[in-house]
Image: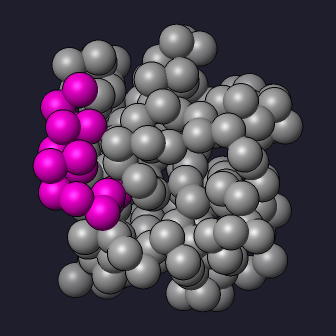
Amino acid sequence: MARHATILQKKTTGLLIIDIQQRINAVMKYRKRVVDNVVKLIKGFQILNLPIFITEQYRKGLGPTEQPILDVLNQPAIVEKIHFSCCAATPLLDQIRQRNIQQIVICGIETHVCVLQTSLDFLAEGFQVHLVLDAVSSRKKHDHEMAIDRLTQAGVIPTTIESVLFELLIRADNQEFKQISQLIK
């Protein structure tokens, strides 16, 4: 069966969580929704045994990653950065390439700064970028919406947590499906 090129494939997909840190997240428009949905994404990627990457922007100023995210990641290897684009963090880009990831699922904050610049740079690097709309946020609704418009016009694929997880599942007749169905209820 032929599949569309933008459908996520388990063997080439990774999740990138960008800068969901306590001090900056406290002023985000959709902060609770983002944390809750990122936790679901993490759990889904763990069920599917897929790679997860996480960054923090200037931890000294913005604080650590939100605790619910750290709790489900269980001692994550956080890549600290000072550039807005995660692609400028060479160790992260190297790790992603070493895993043969071609489709990157992106969530985090802020939509119009780090998420935008990272997504555009991943496109420039030849990756297919999937932006999880119910797992990104900015302080202002206008900035958030403008960034989504700009990113989709540039070729980023808008998606949701359910779409991501069900694309990766492919079938409904396995244990992973049952676990993920329970997760997204």
Horizontal and vertical percent position of residue 11: 58, 36
**Majority secondary structure of the magenta segment?**
helix
Count of picture labels: 0
Looking at the image, which is closer to me, 71 or 148?
Answer: 148
As drawn, is 71 to the left or to the right of 118?
right
As drawn, is 117 to the left or to the right of 2?
right
User: For the magenta stretch, what is the residue range?
Assistant: 136-150
Horizontal and vertical percent position of residue 175: 44, 72
Horizontal and vertical percent position of residue 81: 74, 48
As drawn, is 73 to the left or to the right of 36?
right
Looking at the image, which is closer to me, 65 or 101?
Answer: 65
> Please, is residue 9 above or below residue 67 in the view?
above
**Quadrant hosting residue 37:** bottom left
Residue 135 can be seen, yes or no: yes
As drawn, is 99 to the left or to the right of 170?
right
Instruction: Locate the C terminus by quadrant.
Output: bottom left
Residue 176 can be seen, yes or no: no
**Quadrant hosting residue 152:** top left
Residue 129 inside the magenta-drawn segment: no
Residue visible at 15% across and 49% down? 142
Residue visible at 29% across and 28% down? 151
Residue visible at 66% across and 56% down? 57
